[in-house]
Image (cartoon, coloured by chain):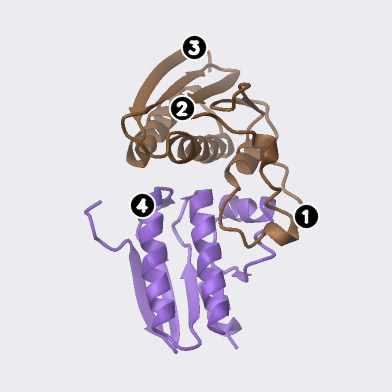
Amino acid sequence: MGQSRTSKPLVIPSSLSEGVKVVETVIEAIQPYGYSDTAQFAIRLALDEALANAIRHGNKSDESKNVTIDFSVDDEEIRISICDEGPGFHPDEIPDPTLDENLERPCGRGVMLMRAYMTEVFFNESGNCVTMVKRRDCQLPHVPED
Amino acid sequence: MAEGESRLTIENSEQIIRIGFLDRNILEEAAIQKIGDQVSDLIDSTPNPRILIDFSDVDHLSSAALGMLITINNRVRAKGGQLRLASIDPQIYEVFVITKLNKLFNICDSASQAMSSFK
C-alpha cells in the first residue's frame, strides 16, 4: 500500500499471442499494490475477454491493425482502456447468453463476463474502445444461488 | 508452446476417456481451438463416448474455452454419449454459475465422483 500511481500505454498488433503478453504485463504491474486474488482473477478474465474482442472482432485478426491498451493502477483502482481500429459495435445488442435459449451458443459471453467482474465497464460511442475499472472495494462478482 | 504439441493428457479407463490439461491457463484461442479439435476427433472415433474432463490445476478459463466446452458437449450428446466436468477451481466454477453454464454441464466435485456417475 502507499504506492504511487503506475500507468503504461501499450500498442500491439492484432495477434492473440500478443494479447496474452499484455495480460501478463498488467498482472505483473499490479503486484506491488496488493490487490486480492479475487481482483486479480477478475482483471485477468476481463482483460482477456476485452483483448480477444478487440483483436478478433474489432480488427478481424488483421495484424496490420493495432490494439492500443492504456492501463493505470494505484491504491484505489485499476483502470484499463482497450481500443481497436474496427468500426465498433453495440454491446447492448448482444443477446443475453444466460437465457435458456442461448445457453448452447458457443459465443457471446465476453462482454457479460467483463460486466460481471469489473466495477465499471463502458464503451465509447462507436463501440471500438472499452474502459474497465476495478476498484479495490469492489464486491463483484455477485454469484447467483447455485 | 511448440507448434503441434498436444496440451492434453488423455487416458482410457473403464471405457471412459479421461482428459486433463497440461496448462494452468486456458486462454489462448489457437490453443483452445486445437484442444477442441483433438477432443472432437476422439468423440467422432468413439461410439457412445463417455468423456471426463478433469480441471485439476487449471486456474483460468476464457469465454472461448467455455465455447469450446459447449461445442464438445453438443457433439457428445449428438452421439448419444455422456460428458462430465470435474475438479473445477472454485473461482472458475463461479464463472460457470454466473454464465448459468452449470445448468448445461454435468459438473462433479472430483474425478472419482465423475467416474462413478457415468451410466
Figure chain in purple: B
Residue position for label 2: A84
Q: Is residue A13 left or right of residue B72?
A: left
**Label 1 lies in what chain?**
A
- Asked if badges 3 and 2 are on one and the same chain, I answer yes
Figure chain in brown: A
Tell me the kind of residue under disc 1.
Answer: Glu
Q: Nearer the viewer, mark 2 or mark 4?
A: 2
Contact check, label 3 and label 2, Cβ < 8 Å: no
Tell me the kind of residue under disc 2.
Answer: Asp
Residue position for label 3: A5
Helix, strand or loop at label 3? It is loop
- Asked if badges 2 and 4 are on one and the same chain, I answer no
Residue A145 - label = 1
x and y percentages locating residue B21 in the rendered image: 39, 62
**Label 3 lies in what chain?**
A
Tell me the kind of residue under disc 3.
Answer: Arg
Helix, strand or loop at label 4? It is helix
Residue position for label 4: B30
Q: Nearer the viewer, mark 4 or mark 1?
A: 4
